Amino acid sequence: MRAHSFDYRQHHDLFERYGISPSGVERLQYSWNEPHRHYHTERHLSFLVSRIEQSDLRGDDLDKMLLTAFFHDVVYDPTAQDNEEQSAEVLRETTQHAVVPEVADMIMDTKTHRPRTELSRRFVELDMAVVSESDFAGLLEWERAVFKEFQYVDYSLYKTGRLALLDGWTAAYPKNASNLHCLMSYLMHHRPRVGVYAGSFNPLHNGHLNILQKAEQIFDKVVLAQGVNPEKEEALTDITRQRKLKYHQTEKFTGLLTNYLSQKEKECDITLIRGLRNGDDLDYEVNQLRFMEDMKPGLKVVFIRCDKQFEHISSSAIRNLEKIEKGLGSKYMPNGG
């Protein structure tokens, strides 16, 4: 659902009229293209702008609606609760025009869904058109995109929260209740394809991230699971605090990996992911797999090889470099360690 390119140049006059500088426009473009967005992207923006421009609105009201469209999701962090407040603040930082207070209020109304003016009601209605107007295929596409944005949430919690939200929207949008009920039924029975990328990640390095990126092209979602041995020293990386993994589900587990995988299978179709650098890694992993298959018959495993530029990187090599001189292995780790 990501592929889309929005031409901001077509709205040069609007930006100029409200004192929005080229750097302000660049900020808009950067924000709407952040990699963690899958529904709240330029495609959503393009839909809103197109519908607004096709409406009967003219003059100041048209401008206010367009400005609300550009700024209402300029800040979107699915882990945060104050996206609308932050988006309104970006608007205030970008332009000091007299319309800012009203547009900021319209942005806030998209959070409460309780519009304070007729113009705001029209925008909120348009912003929710994906729910109120989409057929089942459109709702399913929307659901899959939102699911991607909430990968950091355990699926059982996501499913419970999502069903509750859809139930409320079914009551709020009775004309599309039939399609919304179909989506709820889909969610109740759907088992997403989830890859579990397990390891000690001691430390997490760029080769691991390369494997993760490839795995995300295969599965609906990838969970990173860090095995913890209480008898060993604490790992150099705590994946649950790693900034690079902010929008991913990260967990720690103790005990047998096969037991951890069995717990995850209650609502998801689970496949174990094993990363490879070379043939030696494959020989080792195949031997380990034999033991795991004895403990968990029917275990599904996918082996993914890293790209050539990461073949020499290993956690043990980085630990050795760090023993020689602290920071020596940082170039091989996310964010420089």
Image (tube, helix red, strand yellow):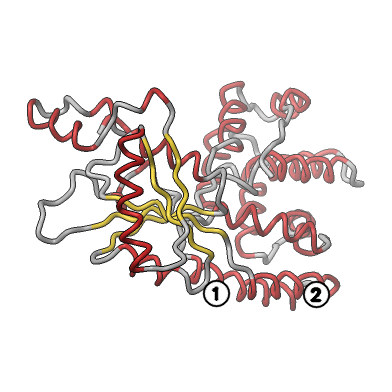
| Residue at the image position 50 percent from the left and 39 percent from the top | 214
For label 1, count other residues whose C-alpha is less than 10 Å away and answer few (under 14), some (14-19) or many (20+): few
Q: Please state the horizontal and vertical placement of residue 63, each as a whole percent of the image.
A: 77, 39
Q: In the displayed structure, does residue 154 sit left or right of residue 162?
A: left
Residue drawn at point x = 16 percent, y = 27 percent: 327
Residue closest to the far left = 324
Question: Is residue 263 visible to us here?
Answer: yes
Q: Amino acid at mark 1?
A: Thr
Amino acid carrying label 2: it is Ala
Residue that label 1 marks: 160
Q: What residue appears at the point 40 percent right and 38 percent down from the top-left corner?
A: 209
Give the secondary structure at mark 2. Answer: helix
Image coords of residue 150 (percent x, y): 52, 56
Q: Which mark is residue 177?
A: 2
Q: Position of residue 184 (x, y in %)?
A: 69, 73
Quarter of the image with the C terminus is top left
As drawn, is 57 to the left or to the right of 330? Answer: right
Residue 284: x percent and y percent?
29, 44
The answer, for residue 79, to whether it is visible in the render is: no
The quadrant of the rendering that contains the N terminus is top right
